[in-house]
């Protein structure tokens, strides 16, 4: 297993957003929290595709000749060292991530538009909601969200032989390296119960598993992303470690049918990501800044892992909350497992 992880990590270069694993995790979590009404509307727009299937479409689209215009909509650049989001400074004319979510939200809910136009808007929302929860997608303009901070080594595993010295950058590490490492350290879904209690130890994170759950097969497979998705969904299930957090995570988008309140909620989410980036992504566990030439260590991974997991979970919960408000007519706090 260790050798396999090294190979996987060494293949990454500069990437987009959470990468396919992270985006699929966000979308799959979102699917568990949709109302029946929202499920019906999404089926009308996406046909046989699920949120998980559609989650990474934008990273292909923005590399195409017809979609290159959309690349700036994946991120938010705040002024140097600001560590907060101000719509007037970082999203002029709505030309940023949350601006695109706000505008495409109005389109996906507009039944006067064609199904094709609304489906296009839905694909944007699915992807961009994942992006805004990646802390280095709401980040410092001076280093392009960590893209100009060059990392000379990535040593994330407890196995001393599991590391790569392939030069990359801090942004790419958050897009992919850290998520993939977490995937391969997560429990096998076949052994994963519906309730997990989380405990942190000096060597990492321990899991107490009970009450086995049966689930439908996953539609796509990257790096066994379902290992991490199942774990996070179990945290949020009734009795799980995060079960009391879900309703709080939903609040920023609870009244998303009112545009001003939608924009306020999106600004709150963007600020949350900006603060997480400054507190965790840009600094080593000892508080020193991450700078070009550094190696990301096992200690760095363990330090940021809870933040990565929480951001992925929040992204999924909030994606569903937004779609429930826009498409589902009703809102619920408890997930519907499909």
Image (cartoon, rainbow, N blue to C red):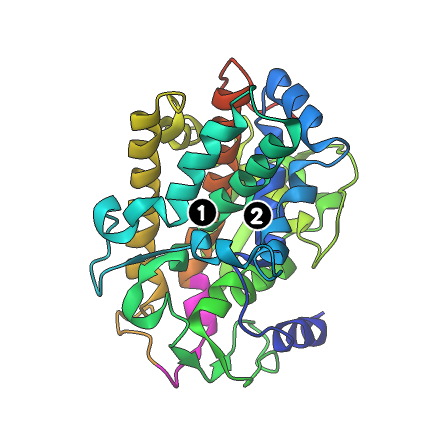
Q: Position of residue 104 (x, y in %)?
A: 48, 35
| Left or right: 23 in relation to 92 | right
Q: Residues within 10 Å of mark 1 (few under 14, many from 20)?
A: many
Estimate the x, y position of residue 115 in percent, counting from the top left.
65, 27
Kindly identify which residue carries mark 2: 207
Q: Residues in magenta? A: 292-302
Task: Let me know if residue 193 is in the magenta part.
Answer: no
Q: Which residue is mark 1?
A: 311
Rendered-image quadrant of the C terminus: top right
Does label 2 or label 1 sit earlier along the sequence?
A: 2
In x, y percent, where is residue 242?
Answer: 46, 35
Could you tell me which residue is drawn at 38 percent across and 50 percent down? 96
Mark toward the viewer: 2 or 1: 1
Q: Is residue 156 above or below residue 236?
A: below
Q: Tell me, yes or no, if residue 56 can be seen here.
A: no
Residue 26 falls left or right of residue 131: right
How many numbered marks have been drawn onto this rendered protein structure? 2
């Amino acid at each position: 297993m260790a050798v396999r992880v090294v190979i996987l990590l060494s293949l990454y270069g500069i990437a987009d957003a959470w990468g396919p694993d992270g985006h699929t995790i966000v979308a799959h979590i979102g699917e568990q929290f949709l109302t029946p009404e929202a499920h019906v509307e999404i089926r009308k727009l996406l046909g046989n595709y699920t949120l998980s299937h559609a989650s990474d479409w934008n990273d292909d689209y923005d590399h195409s000749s017809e979609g290159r215009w959309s690349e700036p909509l994946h991120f938010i650049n705040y002024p140097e060292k600001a560590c907060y989001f101000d719509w007037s400074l970082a999203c002029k004319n709505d030309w940023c991530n949350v601006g695109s979510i706000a505008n495409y939200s109005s389109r996906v809910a507009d039944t006067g538009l064609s199904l094709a136009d609304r489906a296009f808007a839905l694909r944007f929302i699915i992807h961009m909601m994942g992006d805004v929860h990646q802390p280095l997608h709401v980040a410092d303009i001076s280093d392009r969200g960590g893209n100009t901070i060059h990392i000379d080594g990535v040593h994330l595993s407890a196995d001393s032989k599991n590391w790569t010295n392939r030069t990359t950058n801090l942004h790419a590490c958050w897009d992919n390296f850290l998520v993939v490492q977490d995937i391969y350290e997560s429990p096998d879904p076949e052994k994963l119960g519906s309730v997990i209690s989380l405990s942190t130890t000096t060597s990492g994170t321990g899991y107490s598993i009970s009450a086995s759950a049966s689930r439908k097969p996953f539609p796509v497979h990257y790096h066994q992303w379902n290992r991490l998705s199942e774990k996070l969904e179990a945290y949020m299930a009734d009795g799980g470690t995060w079960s009391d957090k879900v309703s709080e995570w939903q609040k920023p988008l609870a009244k998303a049918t009112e545009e001003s309140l939608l924009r306020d909620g999106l600004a709150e989410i963007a600020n949350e990501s900006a603060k997480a980036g400054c507190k965790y992504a840009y600094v080593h566990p000892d508080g020193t800044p991450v700078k070009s030439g550094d190696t990301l260590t096992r200690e760095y991974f363990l330090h940021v892992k809870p933040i990565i997991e929480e951001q992925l979970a929040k992204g999924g919960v909030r994606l569903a909350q937004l779609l429930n408000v826009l498409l589902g007519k009703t809102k619920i706090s408890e997930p519907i497992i499909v």
